[in-house]
Image (cartoon, rainbow, N blue to C red):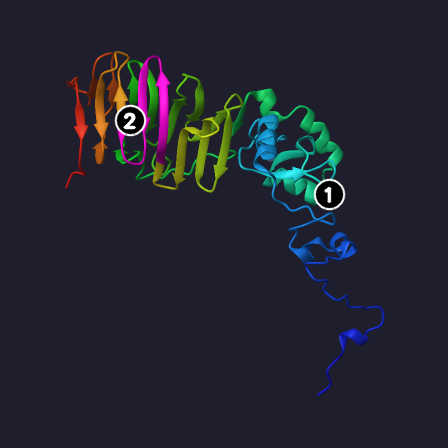
Amino acid sequence: MFVRSWAAEPGIEFAQRPSEKNPEPEMRKVCPAFYGGAMNVHGLTRHIPEAVAREVRIRCGFGCISCGSAIYQYHHFDPPFAEARQHRTDGIALLCSGCHDMVTRGLWTNDHIALLAKAPFCACAGYAHGGHPLEVSPEDFAVRLGPVTCRNLYLLSLDRDVVLILEPPEQTGAPFRLSARFYDTRDRLALMIWRNEWQVGVGNYDVKVVGQTIRVYEAADQVALGLAVHPPHNVIIESLRMLHRGYRIGISPQQVSMRTPSGKEVFTGFAGEIAGVPMILGKDNLSIGGNGIAVNNWVLTRRPE
Ligand SMILES: [Zn+2]
């Protein structure tokens, strides 16, 4: 059998793969994919130190500098990553995958990115957004407040101020429509959802979208809101520390608590399910259901059979 030798082909030469300990700089420049893009010719890795990454997020307003999407990647534009010796905050920008692709394909230059970075979308608009609506089922949808499942919960309001509303589908086959306004412990709007589309304000301390979870930080180690999306049936408020007009709502994976402006704890939910009723947190009590029954200390302790 005749085995063709590629090495014998004229014009084709094989370079020996350099050892990782002693990388060949030119090889990295010519073929970064050879190294998995993990390190550039100057030995700089893709890992951006957290302090630098947060400064980039703040400057870009937690979203793509072109379209405002909060689902983004970090892009080195000045200089490009291949030439960078360090991760400089003013040479890195947030770009969503679609906008990043425009650069990768050569349809946008880094000069264009530098121009966008001077007036990022989110800094101008005041918010970053989810890019696409949340995927919500048309048939079966529940909002989980920590361990408490709210199925077809049409309303949670503080007196007349709506915090969370789940509207039924407009027509058969259309999704439920979730709207919400979450505040931090200083009564500043942290995240807003309007009919399945979410926005975070640029005034937050930090915002991170990791996998299916959106976390809004009030301080370095203080999460104001942790919201997980499990499409198409659940949105889960994993954690919330909220104050709004004197009302306090605390949610952790283990417990939900609601307090009135007078400091009265009117709801403690450890696990359970609330179906098809509005919850209205009033000045002194919580009313559950549309029939006007008010309760002063409603404790939900176990999941109904
Ligand atoms: Zn974009």
Image-quadrant location for residue 46: top right
Amino acid type at mark 1: Gly
Q: Main secondary structure of the magenta part?
A: strand
Dot 2: element: loop
Identify residue for label 2.
154
Q: Is mark 2 within 8 Å of ligand 1?
A: no
Q: Identify the residue at horizontal 48%, vertical 27% (top origin).
A: 199
Q: Quadrant of ligand 1?
A: top right
Amino acid type at mark 2: Tyr
Say which quadrant the N terminus sits in.
bottom right
Query: Nearest the camera: 51 or 94?
Result: 51
Relative to 117, is 284 above or below? above
Q: Identify the residue at horizontal 53%, vertical 37% (top origin).
A: 71
**Residue 237 place in picture, x, y as percent:** 35, 33
> From which residue to which does the magenta span run?
236-256
Query: Nearest the camera: 302 or 290?
Result: 302
* The disc label shown at residue 106, or none: 1
**Residue 76 place in picture, x, y as percent:** 68, 38
| Crowd tier of the residue under label 2, counting other residues whose Cα lies within 10 Å: few below 14, some 14–19, many 20 or above | some
Is there any visible trace of residue 67 in the rendered image?
A: no
Say which quadrant the C terminus sits in.
top left
Is residue 254 located in the magenta-colored stretch of the structure? yes
Q: Is mark 1 within 8 Å of ligand 1?
A: no
**Residue 37 place in picture, x, y as percent:** 66, 51
